[in-house]
Image (cartoon, coloured by chain):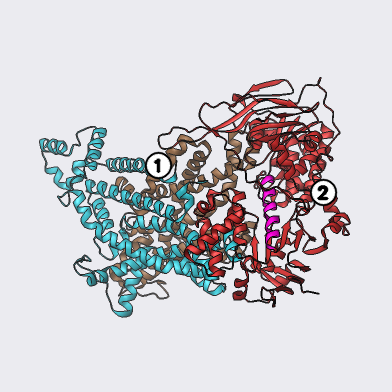
Chain colours: A red, B brown, C cyan
Amino acid sequence: MTTPLLSVSDLCVGFGRDPSKNEIVKGVSFDLAAGETLAIVGESGSGKSVTALSINRLVDFGGGRIIGGSIDFKRRDGSILDLAQAGEPVLEKIRGSEIGMIFQEPMTSLNPVLTIGTQIEESFRLHRGLTGRQATAAARDALDRVRIPDAARRLKYCPNQLSGGMLQRVMIATALACNPRLLIADEPTTALDVTVQAQIMALLGELKHETGMAMIFITHDIGLVAGIADKIMVMQAGEAVEQGQLDQVLDRPQHSYTRHLLSAVPHFESGRAARADFRREKAKPPALTVDGLTVRFKVSGGLLGRSPGSVHAVENVGFDLMPGETLAIVGESGSGKSTTARAILGLVRPTRGRFSAHGLTERAGSVADATDPATQMVFQNPYASLNPRLRIDSILAEPVIAAGGRITTETREKMKALLKRVGLPEDSLERYPHQFSGGQRQRLCIARALMLNPSVVVLDEAVSALDVSVQAKVLELLVDLQKEYGLAYLFVSHDMAVVERIAHRIAVLYAGQIVEIGDAASVLSNPQHSYTKRLISAVPSIDRRNQHFELDTRQVPSLVRPPGFEPPEPQWRDFGPDHRARAEA
Amino acid sequence: MSMLRAIFSHASGRIGGTIVVVYIIIALLGMFDITPHNPLQQFRIDRLHAPNATYWMGTDLFGRDVASRLMKGIGQSFLVGFCAVALATTAGTVLGLTAAWFGRAWDGLVMRVMDVLLAFPAILLALLIIAAAGPGTWTSVAAIAIVYTPIFTRVVRGPALSIKSREFVDAARTFGSSRRYILTRHLLLNLVAPLTVQVTLALAWSLLTEAGLSFLGLGTQPPASSLGLMLADSRNLMETAPWLLIFPALAIMISILGFNLLGDALRDILDPKTRSRPA
Amino acid sequence: MSYLTRRLLTFPLVMLGVSILVFVTIRMVPGDAITAMLGTEAGLLTPAQRDALAGYFGIDQPILVQYWRWLAGVFQGDLGISVTYGRPVLGVILERFPLTLQLALMSMCVALLVGLPAGVFAATRNEKMSDLGVRIFAMIGQSTPNFVVGLLIIYALSAGFGILPVMGEFTPFFEDPLRNLGQMILPAITLGFAFAASVTRISRSAMLDVLSDDYVRTARSKGASKRSVIWRHALPNALIPVVTLSGVEFGYLLGGAVLVEQIYALPGLGRLVLDAILQRDYALVQGCVLFIAFNFMVVNLLVDLAYAALDPRIRLGEGG
């Protein structure tokens, strides 16, 4: 039997002044053979990143200390080294040349003051002794390898001139510069859009194939690793609760936490999991109608003040939303989905467009800042949407005060009832936001939005910042509340798996325009517009094992248009009773 | 209460806090003339007497008790410092908050005026104002307040702008909360922490500026006593009577040190950014 | 619009504000200008002589006309005539400026040579003691007013070693460099003390911030050595706040160090302004203040240029 490339046994890592008292990783063991990919799956605080950072001992710089166990690594020359005991000079030789690493945030993981060329060349300089023109040539080849077009020119760019997806490619190029035998990828696609994520995953898959390197892939999304991993290790609270071959863990999970991750957490099922508990009745007036909503931002001009045009953030968006119905607006960053939500609530001034709620109050775009208690909003970031200096009772009272009401015993009773309804204890009223977890805060935000008995709630990425298992619970609560109060939801999200669980209808937004809209099951199972197809095929899923992603380097189109530009009237094509898509040229 | 406990469990907070409390007591005693001797009384036979049991810090050229004059001087410096900082904080908060909230032309106007004020070295601007209004205690207060207003304006405007774009302010706007409610409960309440830190540090600077102005003879006027004046008087006597230099110098240094240490501690305690950062 | 263009555009605006502020402040001085200029001798003037003088200085005109005339003069390099020196104000200022410039440069050298290494050292050493030592030095440095430092240095030298600082007639650097440096070294150390303390503090905290940034972790993951991480990756990013602070402090020092010049009897810009204020030489005060503010703004512009050199995000504009 050959020795594995990496053999971790009984690894314990602690933090702080007394590391043994504050253990984050508690006795993790695993083996990794050359060319194999191990996925470490867990939620925040599970110790998955700390485990990864311990392998190349970067954990030392974050205040962590390995307090037990061994990390036996087979070096290129065949000797075995225990990385847990190795000294810093040896580690510096191994990092970058034998173990490469890529990180979660490509935007902050590259040095902002150095050109990307310099940063890639550094690897060659450190481990290959290349200098000058040789190093530059090597760096250009490295960029070619990660399929960055026009590599020679891009070498002179600084990180702020490239998009997140491009930067993650640069990171991969840097990490793979010296052909390491092991690549550690710490949530490398979490900060990226789903289509970009698919491209990066495809690239990693191809490079793994080309170089025969082993990979440790850390993620919170068990669906994502189905496409790339050979083995899976599931971590919870610092312990590896289950590990095994991919199919074995996904199909026959042994540990209850793994089963929980697989069942309770939203996974994309191509429309099969879409809700079927609502039927549209044409006779009823809609809870919200949006017609021809357009938002444009003027691009500020140069010295002479002549504006080169406007950003057409949202262009001619229209839909109606029935009481008790969820319409999901999906799209990637820059698609205009959040701007649409904000324009409806009057946080952004629309250039054009009409809204009417309940078919009663009709208002044109210009009066959008008149607020309407019938429409409320829940925001993405639960840590920023509650004023940290106010007590929960003041926070819940704010909409009432704003609407001109007084705080009576009746209001307090209502607060208590709502808190109970969203699953929080009654004594929460006397507490401050920092005493609650992210999921609890989002429940508080929901309670606050319900204080004025709205008919429409706009949820802007309302579960995106939450851990996956918390997400599932908040989604459940939202569905229950919808049925109980007959609420209409406008659910803005980038996450197709989440959308599938809550939406009755879906509108796909691309470059500020709706390209496809209709019944959720129909749109997800049978997408018609090319962008929708691309988007849906990019969504990772546990059903899509060892799938080959198409490598695609298409750029997102610019939204800046010259002054006075009006887009042509859209042509729609019907694909069923409630499903239509924009005709493409 | 929890604030006090936090300050005293912080190393530099404990030292700084103690210094500041002791100084405030001394300043109050000095202001109400509760001193070992009458600070103006001239003990002619004991001129330039070295420190002893009667004159704890010796006497000056006119035979006045240095310790009593020091207490009186600290009272004077603190009076000027606290009044000036109170004025600067109020003006800076109002200007910074409104500049951040209304933006556009008002923001531009306020910030350009602040740029103009910041284009002068602090002591020079103070000198200029005193030149126009004539030296004196209240002129010093006004001069120091004007000098430090731009700093408070900036300290308030920056965080106010970032709080303005936080989601809880967006939420408040969707409820239709009144402008007054948003400005006071959402913005101002969240600015208390950075302001507290700044006020503490500004007290240190204003003591420094006050001492400088008095040293030049443009602040507190004799025969009233102030730390800067005492230092100016010591210049030609420092070799024969070093206590005239050492005690006021230490008094100034330690008081500023106290506020600086306390300000640092408050920053550590109140600023969640530095607190959450791993060591 | 790029950051630098915006800065260039606000420059004249702020200078205009400075000139108005100075002009108005001076006009607020109680008493009439002739009395202020001539002091007690004004009492000996006949009304006709007063009117003639008022006409000569243009102060019989409405204030807007006066301001306009003064401003027009300023643009031609004419800052008016100093009553005390009986010479053009600009000449008097330019005579004093070399000393102030030299003092500011020397203090900045002291500050950067001491402060930057100390700050980096404190941030990168893991032992607590050296960090604590540096922080105590910085704390004391920041809490001691310049003139107190100066007085204590003079006292320590005279009491301890019987040395007195070189006072008396000031010698320009190019006449006798040794004697000049002998005169300037103590003032430079005095001014550099607090300055060095600030540089230490800010470079320590900037370094600590930067060292926990993601890209530093990336550099380590590439196998960069500790030295390379500190000097190549972290320091260029940590320098930005240090440059800001040094620029502002240097700009203020160019306005003259009133107190320290007073203590060491140096004829710099600071003393010039102080004397002008004490002697009510208002043309000189106006000229000096305008000159000082102008210098400060120029230094700030240079700092912005230095930013652009250090940080491509500013050079290229956010998002490129």
- What's the residue type where badge 2 is placed? Asp
In this rendering, position of residue B265 left or right of residue B111? right
Q: In this view of the protein, which residue sits in the foreground, A168 or C85?
A: A168
Give the dominant element type of the magenta stretch: helix, strand or loop: helix
Residue depicted at x 70% and y 52%: A201
Residue A310: where, in percent of width, then height?
53, 32
Which chain contains the residue that carries disc 2?
A: A
Secondary structure under tag 2 reads loop
Q: How crowded is mark 2: few (under 14 residues within 10 Å), some or many (20 or more)?
A: some
For the question of whether residue C87 can be seen, the reply is yes
In this rendering, position of residue A544 left or right of residue C10? right
Q: Mark 2 points at which residue?
A: A543
Would residue A193 be counted in the magenta stretch? yes
For the question of whether residue A413 can be seen, the reply is no
Would residue B241 be counted in the magenta stretch? no
Q: What stretch is highlighted in magenta?
A: A187-211
